[in-house]
Image (cartoon, helix red, strand yellow):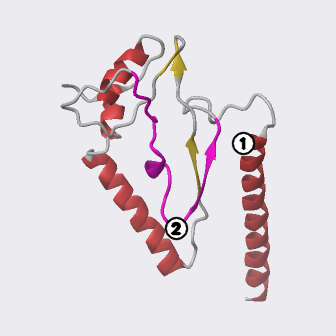
């Protein structure tokens, strides 16, 4: 049987165009995804060890099911492609373990995968992300000032 992510992608195509080949490359057994993940972790290690510059990352995962036509459907690539998922089973588009990186901070957003970056109001999720971005901006400004000061004295 076809991978459930591809089936869901085909279903979503009825409503909104989805690239099913992209979904296949993001599946849990995807060699492409494994290579990207491995290269990303290698880059993080290299920066930390050789440059002394650890990249500050905060990972966010969705909490809610995606709902279309009054029914919830969330895709999680944890069901073997040889099995059809139960009709009443809810899935996450990106499972929490795939939405986090060991050693880096993470949080959840009380929204589905589609809406987790769309804020109609400045709610708690908006504020938690805004606070993080402001903290990064402050740190970047301090690092820039420190770098400029060091450059002047050299």
Q: Which quadrant holds residue 134?
A: bottom right
Q: What residue would you read off at disc 1?
A: 125
Relative to 124, does residue 85 appear above or below in the rendering?
Answer: above
The mark total stands at 2
* Quadrant hosting residue 121: top right
Q: Nearer the viewer, residue 58 or 111?
A: 111
Q: Nearer the viewer, residue 38 or 145?
A: 38
Q: Is residue 52 left or right of residue 1?
A: right
**Residue 124, percent from left and from top:** 77, 42
Graded by Cα atoms within 10 Å as few (under 14), some (14 to 19) or many (20 or more), the crowding at tag 2 reads few
Q: Position of residue 113 (x, y in %)?
A: 54, 33
Would you say residue 137 sits in the magenta stretch? no
Examine the structure image and report whether residue 109 is included in the region drawn in magenta: yes
Q: Is residue 70 above or below residue 88?
A: above
Residue 77 x/y as whole percent: 34, 37
State yes or no: discs 1 and 2 in contact (Cβ < 8 Å). no
Quadrant of the drawing holding the N terminus: top left
Q: Earlier in the sequence, mark 1 or mark 2?
A: 2
- Image-based side of 132 in relation to 10, left or right: right
Residue at (73% x, 53% y) in the render? 133
Q: Which residues are magenta?
A: 88-110
Q: Could you tell me residue 149's position as x and y percent?
A: 79, 81
| In the depicted structure, whether residue 10 falls above or below residue 27 | above
55 horizontally vs 142: left or right: left
Q: Quadrant of residue 43?
A: bottom left
Q: SS of the residue at dot 1?
A: helix
In the picture, the disc for residue 141 is: none
Dominant secondary structure of the residues highlighted in magenta in the image: loop
Quarter that holds the C terminus: bottom right
Q: Which residue is mark 2?
A: 103
């Amino acid at each position: 049987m076809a991978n459930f992510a591809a089936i869901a992608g085909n279903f979503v195509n009825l409503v909104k165009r989805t690239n099913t080949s992209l979904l296949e490359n993001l599946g849990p057994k995807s060699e492409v995804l494994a290579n990207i993940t491995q290269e990303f972790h290698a880059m993080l290690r290299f920066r930390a060890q050789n440059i002394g510059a650890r990249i500050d990352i905060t990972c966010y995962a969705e909490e809610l099911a995606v709902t279309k036509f009054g029914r919830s459907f969330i895709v999680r690539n944890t069901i073997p492609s040889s099995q059809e998922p139960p009709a009443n089973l809810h899935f996450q588009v990106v499972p929490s373990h795939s939405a986090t990186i060991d050693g880096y901070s993470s949080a959840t957003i009380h929204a589905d995968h589609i809406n987790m970056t769309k804020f109609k109001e400045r709610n708690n999720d908006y504020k938690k992300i805004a606070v993080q971005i402001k903290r990064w901006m402050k740190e970047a400004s301090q690092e820039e000032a420190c770098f400029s000061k060091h450059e002047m004295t050299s």
